[in-house]
Amino acid sequence: MEGKTVLVCPLNWGIGHATRCVPVIRLLVKQGFRVILAADGRPLEFLKSEFPSLQFIELPGASIRYPKGSGMMRTLLLQFPAMLKSIRKEHRDLQEIIKREKIDIVMSDNRYGLWSKGVHSIFITHQLEVELPAGTQFMRPVIRRLIASFIAKFDECWIPDFEQLNGLAGRLSHPPKLPPNASYIGTLSRFGIRERPDELPESPVCEILVLLSGPEPQRSILEARLTRQLQNTDLKTAIIRGVTEKVEDFYLTENIRVFSHLETPLLKAMILNSIVVISRPGYSSIMDLTTLGKRAIFIPTPGQTEQEYLARYLKDKKIYFSMEQDEFDLFYALEMSNNYPGMVLENDYAELEKRIAGLR
């Protein structure tokens, strides 16, 4: 007999929030919970490919427009009223789903409206502190209070990081004051827990593996910039476009192979068989790379202050090299990255297993 019913709901901001939910979902299934996945866009398509036997619900979140330039924070602030409206709508939609599907537990990955007084609600986030652009630091206390007020609506807040030494996300996940309902559960990676023995498929060996992700149009802008520079080399390269709604596998040139996306086992094999990875410093990508111990070059999304902070934080620690997108030079980055070896951050998922067991 199945246990309680859990609704898992990742944010649609690229697919990172969905990928880091993978070990949570696997442990829920392992411990006998009935799991329903609620998402939209590329996260929904990714989770369908990862968990084809589970039930899915399309649950749209905020429809956010992203700039072509670097004014990410300004663009988001202008859309803030619409985002609040969307949060209220997803909150109302959730109540209907809870009644219809007899939900016992809701797990929301960074979706602020997905809580309910009638069921146990868990918020998953590493962003307890928001990085602000220059000139807006005076807003930090207001934003801290706003985030705290949202998190307080949930019964628990799970932080995918380690408490010690500022963890992997630095001050983002280690605010001056931790919410009373918050606890650290260790890093989360889809490569960290397998449902079966981890027998990896054969994969191409490449010198450079490009992992594209994140919201448009910046995903496509970076793809075009990297492709132009890679075509001027003879380096054996694989580009994973992060486009889950297509199935593509073709050679752009003799030495550049392009995939729309890859299932987790093959992607893991390709990462391990590469010399260096080039990607955005999205937190989920960082957790994946530290799980596998790979060297990487990061290119933060212009104006996305969280990625810019993480890139600086890890570069200052001499772990990962990074360059800004508008200034990116492939040959210089490859040379400099030799001085940044990456790191291995092991997690046995014992804390997460204990938290999930406590929900039964």
Image (cartoon, rainbow, N blue to C red):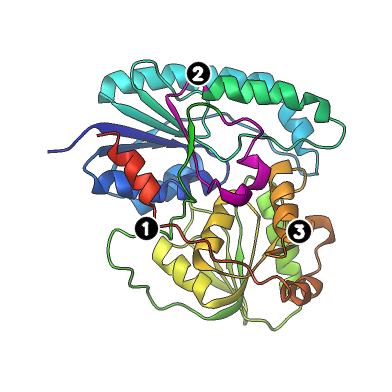
Q: Secondary structure at mark 3?
A: helix
Q: Which mark is residue 86?
A: none
Bin the neighbour count of mark 1 within 10 Å (Cα to Cα): few under 14, some 14-19, many 20 and up: some
Q: Which residues are magenta?
A: 152-178
Farthest front residue?
A: 164
Q: Amino acid at mark 1?
A: Ile
Q: Disc 1 or 2, which lies upstream in sequence? A: 2
Which of the two marks, 1 or 2, is nearer to us in this view? 1
In the rendered image, which quarter contains the N terminus?
A: top left
Q: Amino acid at mark 3?
A: Asp
Q: Residue at x 39, y 52 (%)?
A: 349
Q: Secondary structure at mark 1?
A: loop
Q: Say if residue 86 shows up in the picture.
A: no
Magenta: main secondary structure equals loop
In the rendered image, which quarter contains the C terminus?
A: top left
Q: Amino acid at mark 2?
A: Lys
Per the image, is 206 magenta? Answer: no
Q: Position of residue 58 (x, y in %)?
A: 40, 33
Q: Which residue is mark 2?
A: 89
Q: Which residue is mark 3?
A: 316
Determine whether label 2 and label 3 are within 8 Å by CB: no
Q: 68 or 189: nearer the eye?
A: 189
Q: Quadrant of residue 340?
A: bottom right
Q: Say if residue 66 shows up in the picture.
A: yes
Q: Please, is residue 89 above or below residue 5 in the view?
A: above
Q: Which residue is mark 1?
A: 193
Q: Disc 2 or 3, which lies upstream in sequence? A: 2
Q: Residue at x 26, y 46 (%)?
A: 29
